[in-house]
Amino acid sequence: MIEIRSITKRYFEDTAVDNLSLTVGKGSVFGFLGPNGAGKTTTMKMMVGLVHPDEGTILINGTTPRECVTREHIGFMPENPSFYERLTGLEFLMFCGRLFPKTRFSAEAHCRTLLELLGIIEAADRPIRGYSKGMKQRLGFAQALVNEPAYLLLDEPLDGLDPIGRREMKLIIKKLRGDGTTIFFNSHILADVEEICDAIGIIHRGTLVYAGAVAPFCQGRPLEERFVAVIQEREKVIPFVRHSE
Amino acid sequence: MKTIWAIAANTFRAAVRDRILHGIAGFAILFILFTLFLGSISLGEELIIIRSIGLGGIYLFGLLITLFLGGSLMHTEIERRTVYLILAKPVSIGQMIIGKFLGLLMSIALVIAVMSVTYLCVVWYQGGGFDGAALPAIGMTILELALFIALTIFFSTFLTPLGATIYAVIVLYIGHSLSLLVQFVRTSGALARSAATAASYLFPNLEKFNIRNEALHHIVPSSASLGFTVIYALCYIALLLALATFMFSSKDL
């Protein structure tokens, strides 16, 4: 289970995340939504220990992500992942596997299986600098899966993929959910979120607006329509104070 | 240790595939071969010229490669966000920094080894036989560069690549001038002596690693002296890497 308890993160005068609390049940797919600059990526970085909250705590399976042992069970794919461009996809994946205590994660066969699952096995032995954006996105997904994580955190995983790629990724996410993996992901593609998520959280200017199941939020309307309506409503209540400062 | 080794091996693999590194290394080898020509026009001092310029060239090109690779090392990791993929895994900042340091050191040691083999072949070709006295000098060069890598990594945790390079070069200059400075102020006032003493504690005394002149005259320093220099370098490197870890830990990525 992922428990986010009253976390706040400030960058100088700007509050990126404000007193955010969330609980994500084990084995569920949770979509974290919000407009640009809402605090989604900051929240996710705090969940993997890259950024530390000024207040509050995050517990993943009962321990904080600042502890290395917690991160052994987390797979993380950042937005627009970058790689060591002179390495091949396979070399990079094996390197990622070696960062975990279990030696089988760095085994060539394991890494090739992942590249095959993600549809880039033909490029396994080619330098990453020659990869297209979609291929890099797939490699980013593959490195997040290298340790067979119990918790998968994905920042815009479907960004930059063509419709076929998106379809394949969604199938993988559904399969992982079936295997009991807890998935937390940020996305702007609301149709996909609606299709694969059990629950959603909506964040606006660092504050959580909604957290819960998709159906009650949608009230029979498409998620995108409801999302836009809710955000526009919030904009009326809280005008662009932060951005105009 | 497995994690540190994985990061070191990865850093090494990425560095040795760098085309600019290939360019500098190729030029360094040409430079050492060029000492054959310089020797031939030096009127009976061929071997001294070849050995002097050859050992100096190994040091200078090693330094150049260290500046080129080390100055941008941590900054590039953050700018390109490759650091996200490492630190989101069960890797501590200290492990990452030590791994990067070792990887870079291995890359530079490899280039130094290639240059050294070329140098030894050139000396042998000129009739100087196997220049065994050069080996401790080359070893000390690698040790100095190791300290210099730690220094550039430390600076690159909080400065831009250009800033890290400039500061590292300033420390390099001070580090090589310390002995001279301390001697110079011996007869000066108390304030100057105190300032020089403080500087000698703060900055690394890089002249300790310069035994190239001794090598030219086939003088091998005592093992006690070499051992002390190795311990001195290791302590300094440990301190710089600890400071780099501290500086990096205070960053929000």
Image: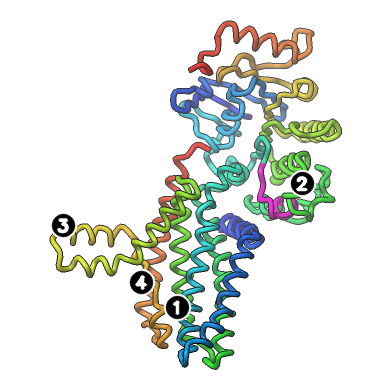
SS at circle 1 = helix
Give the magenta-colored segment's residue range.
Answer: A82-93
Q: Is residue B62 magenta?
A: no
Q: Report x, y in % for residue B79.
A: 57, 42
Nearer to us in this view, B177 or A242: B177
Chain for numbered disc 1: B
Decide: is B206 above or below A179.
below
Chain for numbered disc 2: A
Decide: is B212 above or below A224.
below
Label at residue B191: 3
Q: Report x, y in % for residue B155.
A: 44, 51
Measure the alpha-carbon separation of dots 4 and 1: 11 Å
Q: Is residue A86 magenta?
A: yes
Q: In percent of the image, x 32 and y 66: which residue is there? A: B177
Q: Report x, y in % for residue A215.
A: 75, 13
Residue with the mark numbered 4: B208
Q: Earlier in the sequence, mark 4 or mark 3?
A: 3
SS at circle 2 = loop
Residue with the mark numbered 2: A131
Question: Do marks 1 and 3 share a chain?
Answer: yes
What amino acid is labelled 3 in the image? Answer: Leu
Q: Quadrant of residue B120?
A: bottom right
Q: Report x, y in % for residue B25.
A: 60, 68
What amino acid is labelled 4 in the image? Answer: Lys
